[in-house]
Amino acid sequence: MSKKPATPAAPPCTLFLFGANGDLVKRLLMPALYNLSRDGLLDKDLRIVGVDHNAVSAEAFAERLHAFMAERDKGAEGAPANLDEKLWASLAKRLDYQTGDFLDAATYEAIAKRIDKTSHGNAIFYLATSPRFFPEVAKRLGEAGLLDESGGGFRRVVIEKPFGHDLASAEALNACLLNVMGERQIYRIDHFLGKETVQNILVSRFSNGLFESFWNNHYIDHVQITAAETVGVETRGAFYDSTGAMRDMVPNHLFQLLAMVAMEPPAAFAADAVRGEKAKVIGAIRPWSTKMALKNSVRGQYVAGTLDGKNVPGYRQETKVEPDSQTETFVAMKIMIDNWRWAGVPFYLRTGKRMSVRDTEIAICFKPAPYAQFRESALQRPKPNYLKIQIQPNEGMWFDLQAKRPGPELVMENVELGFAYKDFFKMTPATGYETLIYDCLTGDQTLFQRADNIENGWRAVQPFLDAWARGGEVHDYEAGQDGPQAGGELLARDKREWHRLG
Ligand code: BG6
């Protein structure tokens, strides 16, 4: 969770970044390490060793990262506005590089020699690689004895997403990891959990008595979870075309948001108590039959359109995307959670690329007032009350209320009661990875996914994947629109509508 100024520096460690020359390291991990260093949260003996197959010197590796960080216009998310060269220089001193093939035992022998004596034998192996290497690297780390903690130092492995591409592959990957290390050594990342506003959902729910009294099926009509993006697939056409919006966003990011909103209060704010509650609620998602999965989901794919006044190409025209691709870039779905708190409350989820605005939000829609109190007046039926929790870009929470417009007539208007992060807190640029890296260094697994969280997520989406493999339509939507019309019909059928974006 968020670090107060008095937060102690994390313990010494050698952090191995597998896939050191990839995008994740330069765009997110290095800016996060820079921010942690700025905040004094890295031990003086923390070492960072890039591992990759390209033969480059440690100096060239550091220089490449420096060039990227300095050129902030190219968009290292969360990068500082102006790179502090002195700070960078002290971070660069920690950097080293190991050339090596991930499949070659010699790479692991070299790594063993590098585990710095000053870091007390502590090591983290961060797999920022293509997912096909996850089991291969884990197996070899195990074979080389690098995951053995009997020497007293900790050994941890960080796994990026995608964690599997369906239930069976996620189970197989978990089995492979657990074959060479214990669950407490595995840090499965979902970067949404590094976002302040996502962590704030639990704080809001469980530190304000107000919320609990109406946080259930007596007062809540339905919940909407949206992750709308304006970007297309950028340079990731090949990855995205074999993945699609469902696998890319739903069992991981959207289900994490769902779990934060829907879970029961944990018995303690500790890793296993929190993750146990999350696993329970994700495990309570009703498994649809194939027929119901088709009925309760909509897939879309963007075609050429206009965004922010610019013409943008359609998905099938993107680089490295098949010209007849059926991959969805938008998905909307209805799910039910079969437990005491949420029985009868639909959860509508949607996510898409090239939508009209960037907006990640949870909209909780309350049941209407019990009867039309003002029916004798000229008032229309009041609009439903929403609580909007916006994760990004404008972080905060807002209640929609009905209020009387001043004047002699009784006219109601929608007003907002709100809290915006930027109005209360000084927000320093952050990637979201700062908290996750710090927590991994300090051994706090609360914000990482446990095996059962991941498998329950895949179990819940598997009926949709199976149903789509057998048929169903992928609807077109124009870039710049909020998904296909069928996405709206999914709610209209239940006499509901999507909360306005933005
Ligand atoms: C990633 C997905 O995990 O999350 C991307 O692979 C998506 O496709 C991204 O764009 C969204 O994350 P954020 O933090 O930009 O909302």
Image (cartoon, rainbow, N blue to C red):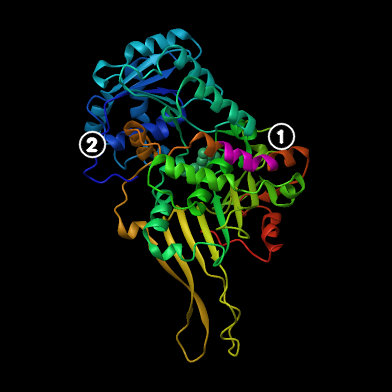
Magenta stretch, residue numbers:
455-463
Question: Could you say where residue 321 lies in the image, as x and y percent from the top left?
Answer: 65, 33
Question: Could you say where residue 493 lies in the image, as x and y percent from the top left?
Answer: 72, 62
- Does 443 sit above or below residue 107? below
Dot 2: within a 10 Å radius of its alpha carbon, few (fewer than 14), some, or many (20 or more) residues?
Answer: some
Disc 2 target residue: 40
Who's the residue at 49% across and 54% down the image? 261
Nearer the observer, 340 or 61: 340
Locate residue 15 relative to residue 466 in the image: left or right.
left
Nearer the observer, 351 or 71: 351
Disc 1 target residue: 323
Nearer the observer, 350 or 456: 456
In the rendered image, the quadrant that contains the N terminus is top left
Residue 24 appears in which quarter of the rendering? top left
- Does 465 sit above or below residue 89? below
- Does 150 sit above or below residue 43? above
Q: Is mark 2 within 8 Å of ligand 1?
A: no
The answer to whether residue 53 of the structure is visible from this angle is: no
Who's the residue at 37% across and 46% down the image? 269
SS category of the residue bearing label 1: loop
> Tag count in the figure?
2
- Residue at mark 1 to residue at mark 2: CA–CA distance: 50 Å
* Image depth: mark 1 or mark 2 in front: 2
Please, what is the three-letter code of the amino acid marked with disc 2? Gly
Please, what is the three-letter code of the amino acid marked with disc 1? Pro
Looking at the image, the residue that sits furthest to the bottom is 408
Locate residue 31 relative to residue 252 in the image: left or right.
left
Q: Is residue 457 part of the magenta span, yes or no?
A: yes
The answer to whether residue 492 of the structure is visible from this angle is: yes
